[in-house]
Image (spheres, grey):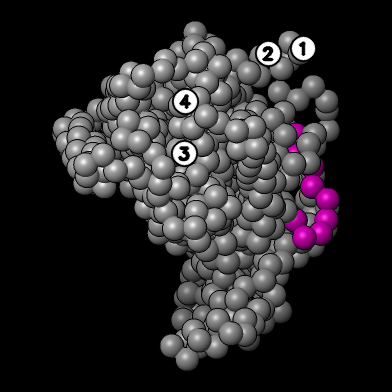
Amino acid sequence: MDGHHLHRIGRYGRSLRRFWLSSLQAEFEYQLNLVVELLAVVGNLVGSLFVLRLLFGNGASLGGWSWDAALVVLGLYTLLDGFTSCVLQPNLSQIVNHVQNGTLDFVLLKPIDSQFWLSTRSFSPWGLPGIAAGLALIGWALMQRSSAISPLGLLIGVVLLVSGALILYSLWFLLASLSIWFVKIWNATEVLRYTLVAGRYPISAYPAALRLVFTFVLPVAFLTTVPAEALLGRSSASWVFGSLAAATLALVGTRLFWRYALRHYTSASS
Amino acid sequence: MLPSAGPIVRATGLCKSFRVAHKQPGLAGTVQHLLHRRYRRVEAVRDLSFVIEPGEMVGFLGPNGAGKTTTLKMLSGLIHPSAGQLEVAGCLPQRRQERFLQQITLVMGNRQQLIWDLPPLDSLRVNAAVYGIDEAEARRRIATLAEMLELGEELHRPVRKLSLGQRMKAELLAALLHNPAVLFLDEPTLGLDVNAQARVRDFLADYNRRTGATVLLTSHYMGDITALCDRVLLIHQGELFHDGPLEALTSRLAPCRQVRLELQQSVPAEAFRPYGELETHHGHHVQLLIPRERLTDQVAALLANFPVVDLEVSDPPVEELIGALFRSAGAER
């Protein structure tokens, strides 16, 4: 890697720091949000736990998952939902506004990758309670189990979680970039978010047809169930490589699609 | 600045046309549009050629929809030309390479890039990081520009609490932080009151003088153009109608000058016919239109042949001339 590239990476790093510092400052202009978001996270978590408790009743299992294994899935969901609130939602929901208000032009004229800017410009601290709650729940559920988690299982689990997050990001960015053609795409990204709620419970708890949809159409399975299996020490090579392949494909696809969208934007707009 | 000499902007045969959906009004029209879309091709810019030297301040004039903004967007690389060649600061704008983006800036009077809830200073820090300007250098540049723009504590107040004029000045600061060599300004004084307008104008003139930056601007206010630009490009229905000094445009739009005479005693109207076109004739007061190229001879002759008490030569105001041109453009559409 030559000096030019190092310099460039440094500039991207410093930009990201400024992006997030400035959005934190802007968010703290509205401090009441913190209380509201904390309540929302706690409420959501309590609701999910209650439903899960009902499903398990007395000693039953859910799609072959025990109570504490299912808690790992719920913990991963809470963690991903927090990540969504921190980064995905505040950034990707802005794309449609940029298109509507014409401020996308300012982004395109910055000497920085436009996808990088649009994906990382904002950071909302209100997802942090979700991330903390998710981590705590995963940790607690894993400790309840008789067998200790293996370092390899942990490593694969983390890799698969990142892979799941990238799949989610790509899907969301792809939908949001459709606003270049159809300005009112905002609702579609909200629908995506609500569909992902399905990731609260292990994928095998759903009917077979839904399982197929959640694996191949809306890859909910890769978001929570697949990393949970790894953390629980029962992942299979096919799921691990499937997840990595899906993430790579989604990222490359998003990148190419964004370039295509920009070509359309720059040739069609007036 | 550019190491190489020669023009900083070169446009040759620049064209831009795009498809617009053609929809009938009403629900039936909407349904029909969904099933069978019909498009119309609109030629926004046609065969535009011009060259701009480094340091020039050039005004773009034209009625709404004449293609001014489209041209500025092509020059800044936001839209691709349909045909023709374009070179700005030694680059092909539409590729939007970093080397190009570091050298240009675009200010749009109707859009803002500053973060609404934060003081301008925070947006400036973001821009500094993105453009790779280190913090000490950014502070120096902010201090210099803030002084030129007469911005002080406003930089520490949330943007939403600033007046429109203060906001525009802060927008300019944000747009100029990276020392661009070429400025594209689309209606930079839009909506500002007379004082704020004058201050933005003074700043731009001062900035151009100090940095030697090239400035291309569009404005609805003739005042901006007359105060800042030695040269104007008048775009009329997508085509270049005039390229040169504003005065030359006036003479082109109004090939005659108005000569008003006050006489000691009244002279019959027929006596003036050989000198020019008689506009009014009221006893002692006579008003003539005389072609520019014969003006001095004819005025000399008038003075020699008639008992002239007072003589006044004037141009119709440029605003009126261009306004008339724009109205005729509007009527043709």
The chain to which mark 2 is attached is A
Q: Which residue bears the numbered disc 4?
A: A231
Which of the two discs, 3 and 2, labels the residue nearer the N terminus? 2
| Mark 3 or 1, closer to the camera | 3
The one of A118 and B126 positioned closer to us in this rendering: A118
The one of A158 and A4 positioned closer to us in this rendering: A158
Type of the residue with mark 4: Leu
Discs 2, 1 touching: Cβ within 8 Å = yes
Q: Which residues are magenta?
A: B81-89
Cα separation between marks 3 and 2: 38 Å
The image quadrant of residue A130 is top left
The chain to which mark 4 is attached is A
Residue occupying image coordinates x 66% and y 14%? A7
Q: Which residue bears the numbered disc 2?
A: A6
Q: Give coordinates of residue B310: x percent, y percent.
A: 50, 62
Q: Quadrant of the C terminus of chain A?
A: bottom right
Residue occupying image coordinates x 83% and y 50%? B85
Residue A166 is at least partly visible in this image: yes
Q: Which residue bears the numbered disc 1?
A: A2
Residue A225: mark? 3
